[in-house]
Image (cartoon, coloured by chain):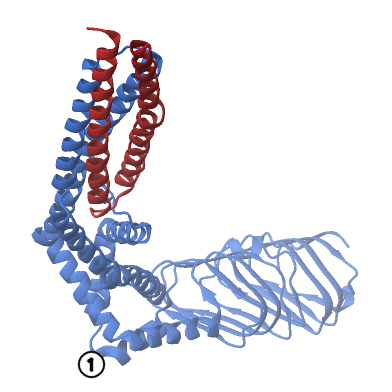
Chain colours: A blue, B red
């Protein structure tokens, strides 16, 4: 990109900033235009409230719009500065430069320099023709050297200035051509018009856009929910309703959750890690989900932890390292449940573990004090390898087959 | 031609040279002024400074002619004329 060499550093900066901004807009025009189209397609006076509502209810969509709007406004601001200030100044300065150039043509300067050169050469001829003699000879020879050197310098300068004149002509000409090219190129002209029209439209609706952003940001702040990552120090109520496929929460961390309720019909829910220090009521209800994976559940220490889900898969059990609860009720009809370790260090008034499934493995079941434990199973291979520190008198086994206790 | 005649001619040549140099200086001043009134760009400003140096050089040559060379020639002519008178 040629930089117009005006002797005005500020103008040059502005001009280059504009050209850079324009280039950025141009380079990102497809994304930009797509986003604008999206905004436009959802944006008219009749749908403002609907749009805001959609943004509130659809965080994923909001993020897309928010980023788009932010980015667009950012681009628009740059473009605005350029179009309102720099471009105008640029054009004005080009006109001024051209006017300046026309008014004080370098032809005059060149002409004067050529006259000077001619006069200089005449001086040289005069000196060369002089009959040097007498006591002043050495001074005259010295003068001759000085004159020849000065003349050489001057000749070179004149040549340089002629070249500079040509450069100036090229600069002015090219600058005009460039501006003319921008103005006359139909594609660029359409883009400029589109951006300008859109900018004007957004500018005139700026208050509403800001409102949308504020509303959306407020929605985000309310839940502190980010896609792919959920971090909330304290959530009073978190409600996630979605019919989207493959809704994933890769790392939800909730230190304190009073009420978590997830009702969803996704095809796939993956919760890699859930850490909840205190949960008053954690309820997961699921209808049609084909797979629910909870690979790691740190600890549940609450009055009631209920899992009601006919589709909770086997993976849940392998990762329950510590399950602490006053009342435990695990109901499952799923095969291949495997609990490596279930520790209930608290007093358990009623621990009911029932299953009709095969292959339940309790590698370690430690219960410090249990008043009543009911273990029922109609399946073979229910093994309790180790039970310690419990009162066997209080244990009533309804297991009819193959209940083996390795050590007590 | 005698040395005295040559010195007379040399003095005229030097005065003529001084004249040409003054004309050159004047034209150079015009050039510099016209450049100042033209579109100012860095390259031109640099050339203008160089032209001013050339002009100063011409001034110095004029000064040498007037202050050194011509007085020297005059002195030599005067000596020769005195010798002729003797």
Residue A268 or residue A339, whichever sits in front: A268
Q: Is residue A18 left or right of residue A175?
A: right
Residue A161 in sight from this viewpoint: yes
Residue A101 or residue A314, whichever sits in front: A101
Farthest residue to the top: give it: B1
Looking at the picture, does residue B41 appear above or below residue A197? above
Q: How many marks?
A: 1
SS label for mark 1: helix
Query: Badge 1 sits on which subunit?
Result: A
Q: Splitting the image into 4 quarters, where does residue A187 fall?
A: bottom left
Looking at the picture, does residue A176 appear above or below residue A279? above
Mark 1 is surrounded, within 10 Å at the Cα level, by few (under 14), some (14 to 19) or many (20 or more) other residues, namely few
Residue drawn at the location 30% of the way across and 50% of the way down: B41
Residue A309 in sight from this viewpoint: no
- The residue indicated by pointer 1 is A46
Q: Splitting the image into 4 quarters, where does residue A123 fall?
A: top left
Q: Is residue A159 left or right of residue A383?
A: left
Residue drawn at the location 23% of the way across and 69% of the way down: A88
Q: Splitting the image into 4 quarters, where does residue A188 fall?
A: bottom left
Q: Quadrant of the C terminus of chain A?
A: bottom right
Farthest residue to the front: give it: B86
x and y, in percent, of residue A92 in the image: 21, 66
x and y, in percent, of residue A359 in the image: 63, 60
Residue B69 or residue A71, whichever sits in front: B69
Residue drawn at the location 39% of the way across and 29% of the way down: B64
Residue drawn at the location 50% of the way across and 81% of the way down: A220
x and y, in percent, of residue B80 in the image: 36, 13
x and y, in percent, of residue A234 in the image: 65, 82
């Amino acid at each position: 990109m040629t930089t117009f060499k005006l002797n005005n550093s500020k103008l040059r900066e502005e001009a280059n900033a504009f050209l850079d901004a324009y280039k950025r807009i141009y380079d990102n025009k497809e994304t930009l235009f797509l986003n604008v189209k999206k905004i436009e397609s959802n944006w008219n006076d009749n749908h403002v409230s609907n749009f805001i509502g959609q943004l509130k209810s659809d965080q994923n969509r909001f993020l897309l719009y928010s980023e788009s709007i932010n980015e667009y406004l950012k681009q628009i601001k740059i473009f605005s500065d350029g179009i309102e200030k720099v471009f105008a100044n640029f054009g004005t300065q080009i006109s001024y430069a051209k006017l300046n150039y026309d008014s004080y043509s370098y032809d005059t300067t060149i002409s004067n320099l050529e006259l000077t050169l001619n006069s200089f050469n005449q001086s040289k001829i005069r000196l060369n023709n002089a009959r040097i003699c007498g006591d002043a000879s050495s001074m005259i020879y010295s003068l001759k050297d000085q004159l020849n050197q000065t003349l050489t310098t001057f000749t070179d300068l004149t040549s340089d200035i002629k070249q500079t004149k040509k450069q100036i002509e090229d600069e002015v000409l090219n600058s005009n051509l460039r501006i003319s090219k921008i103005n006359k190129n139909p594609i660029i002209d359409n883009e400029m018009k589109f951006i300008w029209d859109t900018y004007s439209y957004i500018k005139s609706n700026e208050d509403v856009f800001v409102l949308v952003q504020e509303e959306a940001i407020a929605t985000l702040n309310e839940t502190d929910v980010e896609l792919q990552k959920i971090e909330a120090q304290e959530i009073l109520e978190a409600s996630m309703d979605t019919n989207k496929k493959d809704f994933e929460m890769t790392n939800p961390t909730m230190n304190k959750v009073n009420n978590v309720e997830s009702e969803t019909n996704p095809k796939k829910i993956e919760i890699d890690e859930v850490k909840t220090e205190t949960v008053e009521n954690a309820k997961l209800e699921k209808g049609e989900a084909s797979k629910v994976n909870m690979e790691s559940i740190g600890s549940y220490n609450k009055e009631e932890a209920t899992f009601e889900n006919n589709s909770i898969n086997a993976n849940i059990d392998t990762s329950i390292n510590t399950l602490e609860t006053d009342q435990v009720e695990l109901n499952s009809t799923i095969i291949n449940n495997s609990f490596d370790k279930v520790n209930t260090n608290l007093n358990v008034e009623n621990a009911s573990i029932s299953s009709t499934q095969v292959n339940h493995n309790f590698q370690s079941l430690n219960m410090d004090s249990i008043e009543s434990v009911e273990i029922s199973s109609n399946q073979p291979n229910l093994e309790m390898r180790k039970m310690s520190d419990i009162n066997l008198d209080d244990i009533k086994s309804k297991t009819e087959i193959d209940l083996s206790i390795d050590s007590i | 031609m005698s040395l005295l005649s040559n010195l007379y001619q040399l003095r005229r040549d030097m005065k003529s040279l001084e004249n040409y140099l003054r004309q050159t200086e004047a034209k150079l001043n015009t050039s510099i002024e016209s450049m100042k009134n033209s579109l100012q760009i860095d390259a031109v400003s640099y050339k203008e400074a160089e032209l001013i140096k050339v002009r100063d050089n011409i001034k110095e040559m004029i000064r040498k002619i007037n202050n050194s060379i011509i007085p020297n020639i005059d002195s030599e002519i005067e000596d020769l004329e005195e010798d002729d008178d003797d």
